[in-house]
Amino acid sequence: MTIHSMVLRPILLLGLVAAFLFLNGCASITNGSQQQVTIKTGKNTEIYINGRYAGKGYSSKKLARDQTHKIELALGDCRKTVTTQARFNKMSLLGLFIDAGLVSIPVDFMSGAAWSIYPNNIQAQPNCNEGAQL
């Protein structure tokens, strides 16, 4: 081993560790790419999230922050649909103070952490009017 390679190896290792640390944005670190969504409804009402059965009466699931989600409530012939939205999460702007946003903000957008699900607490009942029963 030469002196040149002995000096380059620790510098390369230190550079890789630093790159790994900076590949997380502020929103990625504090919030992650998923968010807890809670649905409360009548105890016999079936809950479906994106077409998949999620339980009756109450459900709390972690969902991807960067997508819209379709929450369906069903009780017999009665139905209600709530669609969530992905809204900008201001926490990702903290990357401006860390690395001028050059790495951290794009990482937050790519991981989905730059978004928040709205609404994330849903309390609703299915609609049971005559139009819903047709």
Image (cartoon, rainbow, N blue to C red):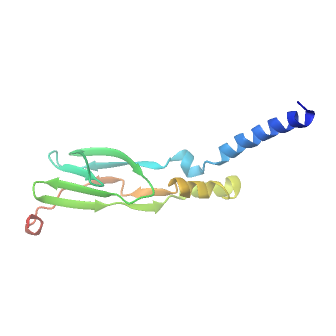
Residue 18 visible to an observer of this rendering: yes
The quadrant the C terminus occupies is bottom left
Q: Residue furthest bottom?
A: 131
68 sits left or right of 56 in the view: right
Q: Residue at x 55, y 49 (%)?
A: 28
Residue 124 visible to an observer of this rendering: no
Q: Tell me where residue 80 sits by quadrant.
A: bottom left
112 sits left or right of 82 in the view: right
**Count of labels in the image:** 0
Q: Position of residue 39 (x, y in %)?
A: 28, 50
Q: Residue at x 34, y 45 (%)?
A: 61
Q: Residue at x 45, y 57 (%)?
A: 66
54 sits left or right of 42 in the view: right
Residue 52, above or below 118: above
Q: Residue furthest top?
A: 1
Q: Residue furthest front?
A: 1
Q: Position of residue 74 (x, y in %)?
A: 17, 54
Q: Position of residue 52 (x, y in %)?
A: 27, 50
Q: Tell me where residue 21 sits by quadrant.
A: top right
The quadrant the N terminus occupies is top right
